[in-house]
Image: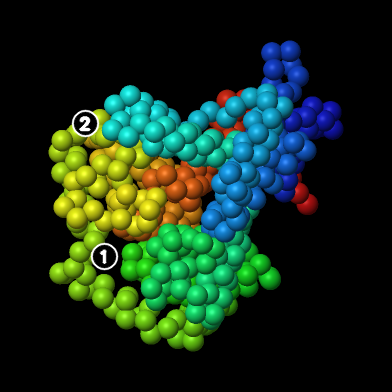
């Protein structure tokens, strides 16, 4: 009789050391059968989905050196990769037959893109606004593909890896330019045909991410991330970008914020990496770069930050005339040249330099409404970090801080790394929420359908 009772209870239960544990997938149906509950809700990727993700990986890999290869009458190679990625991604989603529910950040981001497109109606530079609107749509498509094709942490870490490996291309090219004395501008070095300030921030953003992957990986991959940290720091100093240097100081805060997590061996490895970085900086960075970086305090106190404050004053005057809707996306350069007493011309194609401040650029081009949406997006991203594990939470807090410091002297609201980081952050928050959801559902399922417990004594 005891044997028969045990057999009846065995269905939907496990006996472990005198306890009876209910199978996590057992959920009684009205007909008495047992239904399986999905714990993670992750389906096996199809061949087309894997191909689309590989294309997305290649797109992220090419971001840190996007200007290195150009195709005549078409644009950069990254543009071609992006078009292929979108096509494959759409086909993969159609094959899967369903869409993931968007995060709040996607909704705010979509509204921001919509407003940029609508600004064509009142733009003071409609041709430029139309181009910018299409660029925003393409960037939003990339964010959507990250959400659809990288729902799990392991795919997100692979995209991080792609970005880190991509920095080797521009970093090594910068180092080569320095050794061969090929300056991008006077006494400054930047590889992959990138602007020195842009390259500096690209590298600064890679530091927290590379450090995170370093801690999460072992073996030879960990050494690749250590070498990347040394290369990134050296490259930033070779660009002599003062804004990127400040952003790098913020990026290095990831080390003390996470030192409690490190093992003794990892702490020794971090100290060794920092020592090699200092040695590399002393070995490769010329005195001219150090001299330019040393002017940072005086520029803040008395200077114009290489003419930036003059541009900011002109931008503020434009905003006072068009406060609510702005002058239209991508119209800042053209309109500010009419306000400046002495127009600043970069070359024949550029009537004036960009805003050199992402927040001011959004405020002037899309007015108070666009600025509120942009700040709301940042607020949603920051608030979404509350449910993340502590290590990942601190990674993204530092990364957002690096971005804020870096874009305070650059126009980066339409740059691919900005949208990649925002999209990756939303994807990682979504995967964490997905992990919490099934665990809570299982606890509720277990409490609701709890079966009687059969106590089995162990000899």
Q: CA distance from mark 2 to mark 1?
A: 29 Å
Q: Quadrant of residue 347?
A: bottom left
Q: Nearer the viewer, mark 2 or mark 1?
A: 1
Which colouring convention does the figure follow? Answer: rainbow
Mark 2 Cα within 10 Å, few/some/many (few <14, many 20+)?
A: some
Residue 23, percent from left and from top: 71, 35
Between 48 and 394, the one lying in front of the other is: 48
Identify whether 143 is placed above or below 397.
above
Where is residue 405 shown, x and y percent of the image?
Answer: 33, 58
Query: Image point 48% across, 51% down: which residue?
Result: 417
Residue farthest toward the front in the current orientation of the protein: 348
Q: Nearer the viewer, residue 387 or 132?
A: 132
Reply above or below: 329 against 419.
above
Query: In which quadrant of the rendered image does the N terminus lie?
Result: top right
The answer to whether residue 157 of the structure is visible from this angle is no
Labels 2 and 1: the sequence-earlier one:
1
| Mark 2, secondary structure of its residue | loop
Q: Residue at x 68, y 71 (%)?
A: 220
The one nearer the camera, 49 or 83, is 83
Residue occupied by mark 1: 306
Instruction: Return the mark for residue 324.
Output: 2
* Residue 289: quadrant of the picture: bottom left
Residue 296 visible in image? yes
Q: Position of residue 154 (x, y in %)?
A: 63, 50
Which residue is pictured at 53% across the width and 74% down the height? 177
Q: Considering depth in this image, is 284 or 330 the residue closer to the camera?
A: 330
Q: Determine the residue located farthest toward the top in the rendered image.
A: 31
Query: Which residue is depicted at the point 30% across and 30% down?
Result: 123
Secondary element under disc 1, as helix, strand or loop, is loop
């Amino acid at each position: 009789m005891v044997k028969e009772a045990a057999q009846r209870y065995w269905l939907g239960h496990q006996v472990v050391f005198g306890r009876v544990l209910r199978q996590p997938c057992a959920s009684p149906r009205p007909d008495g059968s047992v239904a399986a509950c999905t714990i993670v809700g992750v389906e096996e990727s199809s061949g087309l989905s894997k191909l689309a993700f590989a294309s997305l990986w290649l797109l992220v890999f090419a971001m840190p050196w996007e200007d290195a290869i150009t195709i005549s009458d078409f644009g950069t190679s990254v543009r071609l990769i992006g078009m292929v990625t979108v096509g494959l991604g759409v086909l993969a989603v159609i094959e899967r037959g369903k869409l993931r529910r968007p995060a709040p950040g996607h909704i705010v981001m979509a509204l921001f893109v919509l407003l940029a497109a609508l600004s064509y109606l009142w733009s003071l530079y409609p041709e430029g606004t139309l181009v910018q609107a299409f660029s925003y749509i393409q960037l939003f498509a990339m964010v959507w593909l990250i959400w659809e094709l990288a729902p799990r942490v392991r795919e997100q870490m692979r995209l991080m890896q792609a970005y880190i490996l991509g920095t080797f291309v521009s970093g090594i090219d910068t180092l080569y330019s320095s050794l061969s004395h090929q300056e991008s501008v006077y006494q400054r070095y930047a590889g992959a045909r990138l602007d020195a300030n842009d390259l500096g921030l690209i590298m600064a953003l890679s530091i927290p991410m590379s450090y995170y992957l370093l801690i999460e990986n072992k073996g030879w991959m960990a050494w690749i991330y250590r070498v990347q940290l040394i290369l990134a720091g050296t490259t930033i100093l070779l660009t002599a970008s003062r804004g990127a240097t400040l952003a790098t100081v913020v990026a290095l805060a990831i080390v003390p914020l996470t030192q409690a997590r490190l093992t003794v061996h990892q702490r020794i490895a971090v100290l060794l990496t920092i020592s090699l970085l200092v040695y590399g900086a002393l070995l490769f960075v010329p005195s001219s770069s150090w001299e330019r970086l040393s002017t940072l305090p005086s520029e803040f106190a008395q200077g114009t930050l290489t003419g930036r404050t003059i541009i900011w004053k002109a931008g503020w005057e434009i905003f006072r005339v068009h406060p609510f809707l702005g002058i239209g996306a991508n119209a800042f350069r053209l309109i500010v040249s009419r306000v400046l007493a002495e127009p600043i011309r970069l070359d024949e194609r550029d009537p004036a330099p960009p805003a050199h401040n992402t927040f001011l650029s959004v405020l002037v081009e899309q007015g108070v409404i666009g600025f509120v949406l942009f700040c709301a997006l940042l607020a949603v991203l920051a608030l979404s970090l509350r449910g993340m594990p502590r290590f990942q939470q601190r990674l993204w807090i530092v990364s957002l801080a690096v971005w804020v410091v870096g874009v305070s002297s650059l126009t980066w609201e339409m740059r691919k790394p900005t949208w990649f980081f925002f999209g990756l952050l939303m994807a990682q928050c979504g995967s964490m929420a997905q992990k919490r959801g099934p665990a809570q559902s299982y606890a509720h399922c277990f409490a609701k359908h709890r079966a009687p417990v059969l106590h089995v004594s162990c000899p």
